[in-house]
Amino acid sequence: MAAVMFMVILIFIIVIQAFLPKFLKDSEAFGIYIPDTHVKDKRLEQMKNRYTQLVLTSGIVILAIFIGWLWMFSPAEEKVVYVGMAAQIVALLFSMGLYAKNHIALANWKKDEKWTEGQSERKVVDLQFREQLKLLPNVYFVLPMFITLGLGILGLSQYDTLPNQIPTHWGPSGEADAFAEKTWISVSALPFMTLILQGMMLFFNGAMKQSGAKIQVRHKKRSREQQLAFRKYSSWLLFVVAIAVTLLMGYLQLTIIYPETMSSSVTLGFTLGFLVIILGSVLYYTVKVGQSGTRIAVSEQDVDAVDVIDTDDDQYWKLGLIYVNKNDPSILVEKRFGIGWTVNMGHKGSWIFLVLLFGSIFLIATLL
């Protein structure tokens, strides 16, 4: 079963990474802003196609090696986990290395050929945009937190009846394979980690409302509709992830409290269900929405201004992946290469959030 899970995840990673350029908007390629005057450049399409071909080819080779290794050696599940993770990392590293190569080449083309020189840049500000957002209310994300809090209290109330060894990790087969001595911390660790993840979803949902909309100056109506849809679907994706996390982690907490009523097969079923929900939701979101909602069909196909281009903010993107802009009040910003959001590392709120997130995880891991 572990082999099947890792093969599915590996195939998912390869396919998403390979076809990612196809789901991005024309005005951005490999982390570089492309002005409307150059979006039809044939070299861009050739670069994207070449990237897709190379990532797919390398992915097939990695997958074939992994399957061949499984067939030849019939390894134990523990080895399958390590090798499977290594295969995923290699696939990601190859695609990111190829991305970096294309990013640098494209940046040099743009600089040497002076794509934006002599053109008037403009940024669109829509004061009514936030009022028309259709994000899920924050209460949708708060309610699952009460469920987790209740399970945490239930675990502590049954403290005296719990076994001396508390499960802290479950393997691919559904069996617990790591334990910690029973303490108030070990009993509360799983609900606490769940609350951290749920709080992160709540934070992202709220931060999306404050994030500035990237409305294209030459396609105001179209990009505005797509931006509104992009945020709506993003909010729903966060909610689906929050519910999936709550169900899986809540079940695992129940296995700690009532171990005699649970089985490894049920645990495996919950794990597989979680995997299907997460991968399926991300795939649907990618295909349906695309970057910034560019795959959302809208009624407006306008060209408002042909003599201006959008503001070129390449200077704020490090390798097209890390956004650093102290003057931007947004904590969350849309990714340039990828589907979804990233944090503005120039905003102090981002650093506070990251310190609290990783600090909490590190604290729990240290105390267990």
Image (cartoon, helix red, strand yellow):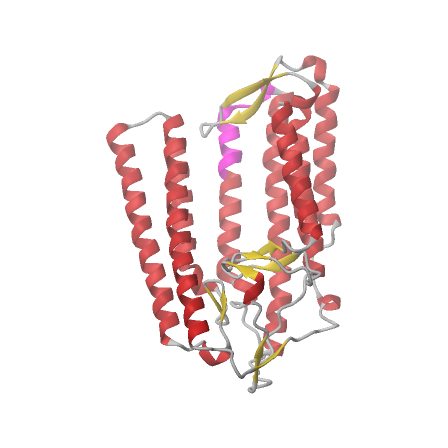
Residue 241: percent from left, percent from top: 59, 46
**Is residue 365 found left or right of 65 in the rendered image?**
right
Quarter placement of the C terminus: top right
Q: Would you place residue 224 above or below residue 56 in this image?
A: below
Q: Is residue 64 left or right of residue 92?
A: left
Q: Which of 348 and 283 is in front in this view?
A: 348
Name the residue at the front extreme. 112
At 71% from the left and 17% from the top, the residue drawn is 159
Find residue 259 and report its horizontal and vertical position in percent: 59, 19
Relative depth, front residue between 87 and 236: 87
**Quadrant of the image occupied by residue 231:** bottom right
**Residue 11 seen in render:** no
Position of 296 relative to 99 (above/below)? below
Identify which residue is drawn at 73% across, 22% down: 156
- The answer to whether 305 is drawn above or below residue 269 in the figure is below
Look at the image and say whether residue 82 sits in the magenta stretch.
no
Where residue 293 appears, x then y in whole percent?
56, 66
- Which residue lies at the image location 43% right of the left edge and 64% below the top edge? 22
* The image quarter in which residue 212 lies: bottom right
Using the image as rendered, state which of residue 48 and residue 228 is in the foreground: 48
Estimate the x, y position of residue 351 in percent, counting from the top left: 67, 47
| Quadrant of the image containing the N terminus | top left
**Which residue is rendered at x = 71% and y = 51% of the image?**
349
Q: Main secondary structure of the magenta part?
A: helix
Image quadrant in which you'd find residue 165: top right
Task: Give the magenta-colored segment's residue range.
Answer: 259-272
* Nearer to us in this view, 292 or 29: 29
Magenta run includes residue 271 = yes
Total marks in image: 0
